[in-house]
Image (tube, helix red, strand yellow):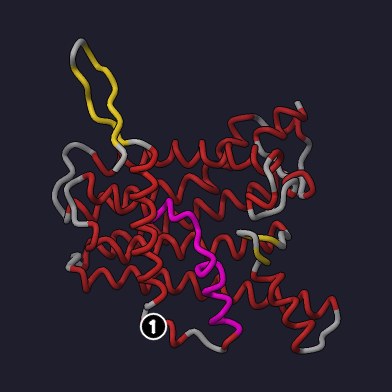
Amino acid sequence: MDIETAEIGEGETAPQVGWAAFEDALRERRRLVYDYLDTWPGASEFKPDDIHDAIFSYIKQRGKGLRPLLLLLSCAAVGGDEDQALPAAAAVEVFQTWTLVHDDIIDRDDLRRGAPTVHAQYKCRALEAYGLGEGEAAHYGRTVAILTGDLQQSWVYALMCDLTGRGVAADLILELIRRMSSWLTPQLMEGEMLDAQFSLVPPDALTEEQVLTMLSKKTAALLEYAAWCGAKIGLRGRADEQGYADKLSRFAYLCGTAFQLHDDLLGLTGDESALGKPVGSDIREGKRTLIMHKALA
């Protein structure tokens, strides 16, 4: 690992983890998570082939893996065993994936990670393999993407149940699943719904606080959950007298909000070939990102 030192007083230094160390940690945990997903035995039930291949489409392209990393490191930060939390880290990555599949339909984006989005990919397949017209082929692509996201969401809960095989107590698993289904998913859906609604109202009808709330629910909520979930698994049911789970989730929430603000800037100024997704789509869709809110004001 690349460890740098920073002066903290006369003649004293404290170790700081450098960027290379962070990337090493991310790379290794990303590999573990994707190996887990690639070899998951229940995937044989994902049928027919168009659904199976669509489910693994974004997974085979490999995302950044930041949410699983956050979950595993939060587990370790409270003294837990990262290996025990691996199924939950895989679940968080699949959770992120199904939201992307559906989000790409909502945003009408045809590019994700430098490759066709699921609905665009299966529109092309319908044109070529089934000889459908443009409209029917587009409908088939959206149908495959909707069903894919639905089944990926189901997969998330199956992955969370895998925690039983890692020695996580059943009552804790229920708590993790309950928070995912009754808090995380509603937060995310609220953010997506507000995003759609905000594009329909005059710019002066919105405040900066409303825009930030919408962006945070869309993006920060999942990072917040990942840190909380990892800490809860790491604590193994012990009393969290120091409030580590809440503190880690708050840290993750703020990072997630910052991540979305930066992503929105890249969505206007970035290089499409480097980003792997369309530049300028927020403007085309009338999205009320913070930068657009400021510009319109």
Q: Residues within 10 Å of mark 1 (few under 14, many from 20)?
A: few
What secondary structure is the stretch in magenta mostly built from?
helix
Residue furthest to the top in view is 10
Q: Is residue 175 above or below residue 21?
A: below
Identify the amino acid type marked 1.
Gly
Q: Nearer the viewer, residue 129 or 97?
A: 129
On whether residue 63 falls in the magenta region, the answer is: yes
- Mark 1 falls on what kind of element? helix
Pinpoint residue 107: horizontal percent, then vertical percent: 70, 56
Q: Quadrant of the N terminus?
A: top left
Q: Measuring 30% from the left and 30% from the top, which residue is drawn there?
A: 4
Pinpoint residue 112: horizontal percent, then vertical percent: 63, 60
Q: Mark 1 highlights which residue? A: 42
Q: Measuring 20% from the left and 10% from the top, which residue is drawn there?
A: 10
Q: Nearer the viewer, residue 223 or 72?
A: 72
* Residues rendered magenta in the picture: 50-68
Pinpoint residue 123: horizontal percent, then vertical percent: 74, 76
